[in-house]
Amino acid sequence: MTYFIILAMIFAHIVDDWVLQGKLANFKQRSWWLEVAPDELYKHDYIMALVIHSMSWSFMIHLPLAWMLFGFEVPLAFVVSFVINAAIHGVVDDLKANRHKINLVNDQLIHLAQIFVTAACFLF
């Protein structure tokens, strides 16, 4: 069951980061807002898109753990893990999409590392 949970977490990552993201991929880029909505009012809207996507991603990778291990009655450590993973995901995506400090390969390797560390915390 352990390996299935890890595979399900990776699959959830692929679905959320590649399939479901849709317009959020544009919305989380500061440059998109400057081009499409250059008004001062919208200059920080990319941050909300980063937060929304990060929370969605963290929720998705935690679903297999919640379902298979806890029956959705999750402990506080699970909630803490959710928040930490969402925060890391947001920072990493900002480093890729806005600060141009890392590339897509680095971004995806960090997200996979998050999955393996999270799985290790709950499964081993």
Image (tube, rainbow, N blue to C red):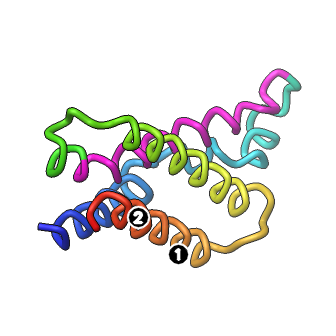
Say which residue label 1 marks: 109
- Write down the quadrant of residue 3 in the picture: bottom left
The structure residue drawn at horizontal position 23% and vertical position 62%, both measured from the top left corner, is 8
On screen, 27 above or below 73? below
- Write down the quadrant of residue 2 in the picture: bottom left
The structure residue drawn at horizontal position 75% and vertical position 39%, both measured from the top left corner, is 33
Marks 2 and 1 close (CB-CB < 8 Å): no
The residue nearer to you, when weighing 84 against 37, is 84
Q: Point out which mark residue 74 bears.
A: none
The residue nearer to you, when weighing 5 against 124, is 124
The picture places residue 104, in percent across and down from the top left corner, at 60, 72
Magenta span includes 110? no
The picture places residue 49, in percent across and down from the top left corner, at 60, 37
The picture places residue 124, in percent across and down from the top left corner, at 28, 68
The residue nearer to you, when weighing 51 against 71, is 71
Q: Tag 2's secondary structure? A: helix
The structure residue drawn at horizontal position 38% and vertical position 52%, both measured from the top left corner, is 16
**Quadrant in which the N terminus is drawn:** bottom left
Magenta span includes 62? yes
Q: Which secondary structure type mostly characterizes the magenta part of the structure?
A: helix
Mark 2 or mark 1, which has the lower sequence index? 1
Query: Which amino acid type corresponds to the residue marked 2 in the rendered image?
Result: Ile
The picture places residue 95, in percent across and down from the top left corner, at 73, 60
Q: Residues within 10 Å of mark 2 (few under 14, many from 20)?
A: many
- In the image: residue 34, left or right of residue 27: right
Q: Residues within 10 Å of mark 1 (few under 14, many from 20)?
A: few
On screen, 93 above or below 3? above
Say which residue label 2 marks: 115
Q: Tag 1's secondary structure? A: helix
Give the extent of the magenta segment. Answer: 41-65
On screen, 11 above or below 20? below
Separation of marks 2 and 1 at Cα, in angstroms: 10 Å
